[in-house]
Image: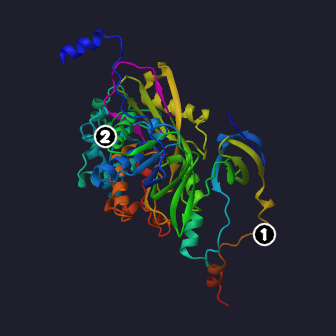
Amino acid sequence: MKLMPCPLNGSRNISEFTYGGEVAAMPDPTACTDAEWADYVFNKSNPAGVVREWWLHNASNYWFIAERDTVTDTVLRTFDPGEIFKTRIDFTPHATSQENPA
Amino acid sequence: MPFSLLRYGLSSEPRIKPDFPPPPPLRDAYDVVIIGGGGHGVATAYYLAKHHGITSVAVLEKGYLGGGNTARNTAVIRSNYLTPESVRFYIASVNLYRDLSNELDFNIMYSERGQLTLAHTDSAVRAFRQRCEVNRHLGGRSELLDRQQIGELAPLLNLDPGRLPVLAGLWHVDGATARHDAVAWGYARGAVRRGVDFHPLTEAQDFVVEKNRVTAVKTHRGTIKCGCVVQAVAGASSILLGKLGIRAPIHTYPLQAMVTQPVKPFLTPLVSSSALHCYVQQTGRGEILIGGGSDPYPLYGARSTSDLKEGLLAHAIEMFPFLANAKLMRQWAGITDMTPDYSPIMGLSPIDNYYLDAGWGTYGFKATPICGVTMAELVASGGKAPELIRPFSLDRFSHFRQINEMGATAASH
């Protein structure tokens, strides 16, 4: 059994978790080009080495970030996303302004 | 002949007739450098020499011939995919496979047994009907079977595993298997005899790029000038593309498989179940080969995780309960380069003379011959992608034109 050190629940069996993809900076969906958006959606750095990625603890529905080595399959560090995401991202500023015309 | 055989039988010296000469010295320059000496790489070299008369070709392999995923796949050959683009491509591949032993004068042990995929839900039956019709429309042989017909094809198959009774089956008559090593050996021998240089233990480490063209490939044995480069390195695709600063939609996952001890022949078709994420076939030697879905998260290590193995075996036993008494002989994993739409990436790259044969994930072996033909054509024409592979270009992702084959994998990864 491989263990994942969850920042919220402590060490748990890795089968309780779902892999959520690499952590990547999202371009502004309303301002970026199609090519920039496609690059964000599809392209991966996929390194043979340490990668920073999203993980979900299924039972508690808690998303966190792990630094994992993809060659040795060892988790180096896990932490709450709040450590790097300091402000809330509003995904629908455009839609909101349409619903409530000034 | 009888006398020579008798003489051979009585002589103490074995008659040594090597298929390959020892590797030649590395030349300073080649017209074409192919990185990756697996099935796809050597097939491309073979057709470059045979169809286009291009023999200034070097195949660079960091290990040995066909030692990567060519040696690790489960040798399934089929064309029952979902989209017309894929089906057309794989049917061309199956047609080449049928005659490959004659073509190469090398027995690849092609065995057309048919492939049976089991549907356990109504939605799977609907999807299978579509795959069946697409396949037939484009010239493949597929039909839907009911439970009784399935029972006749695979008498020891459990038709009511757990809460998932088998409702129907997609019977693909063209489904086949072959000896995977022999495919690489046959192509490599044919290529080397036509003048191609095969360099084992030669790792491509870096590139020299001038004016958006690769002018030389750096290996640990020296630098080779090149006219163009073909990349066919499966699990290492992202790493090599990274040297050129190219980002690709590829995630590297291990894919596991295992075989049991040999038993008496009991199973002719290749049987897979999409809901149980498992496929089972009996090899020519009698071993029962069990394969499944990819590991749950990306890895570059072929050391298998035990969780997935446990689940895979449980499902294999659900399909064929008597397997519970069979002993496992060995298990292994291949490092696969998965794309988001489960279709390959073939053709041009952002570098002018650098051609891609990547993203082959879990379905590369069955496409080996047609990859060789089309990649050779792409190289010989100086970068004009053949019709058959145009839909699989890298830039399909920036235009949001994916070719979704996720549902058509044998074990629904």
The vertical placement of B314 against B87, above or below, is above
Residue denoted by label 2: B175
Q: Tell me where residue A51 appears, x and y as whole percent.
A: 68, 52
Q: Nearer the viewer, residue B295 or A7?
A: B295
| In the image: residue B299, left or right of residue B393 | right
Count neighbours of disc 1 (C-alpha within 10 A) and say few if under 14, some if 14 to 19, many if 20 or more.
few
Instruction: Indicate whether residue B272 is drawn in magenta.
Output: yes
Count neighbours of disc 2 (C-alpha within 10 A) and say few if under 14, some if 14 to 19, many if 20 or more.
many
| In the image: residue A24, left or right of residue B266 | right
Instruction: Indicate whether residue B97 is drawn in magenta.
Output: no
| Residue B185, quarter of picture | top left
Q: Nearer the viewer, residue B92 or B212?
A: B212
Describe the element under mark 1 as helix, strand or loop.
loop
Badge 1: chain ID: A
How far, Cα to Cα, is label 1 from label 2?
Answer: 54 Å
Q: Give the range drawn in magenta.
A: B257-276
Describe the element under mark 2 as helix, strand or loop.
loop
Residue A87: which disc?
1
The vertical placement of B403 against B276, above or below, is below
| Residue B401, quarter of picture | bottom left
Which residue shows up at 19% across the image and 14% down it? B3
The majority secondary structure of the magenta stretch comes to loop
Which residue shows up at 29% across the image and 42% down it? B97
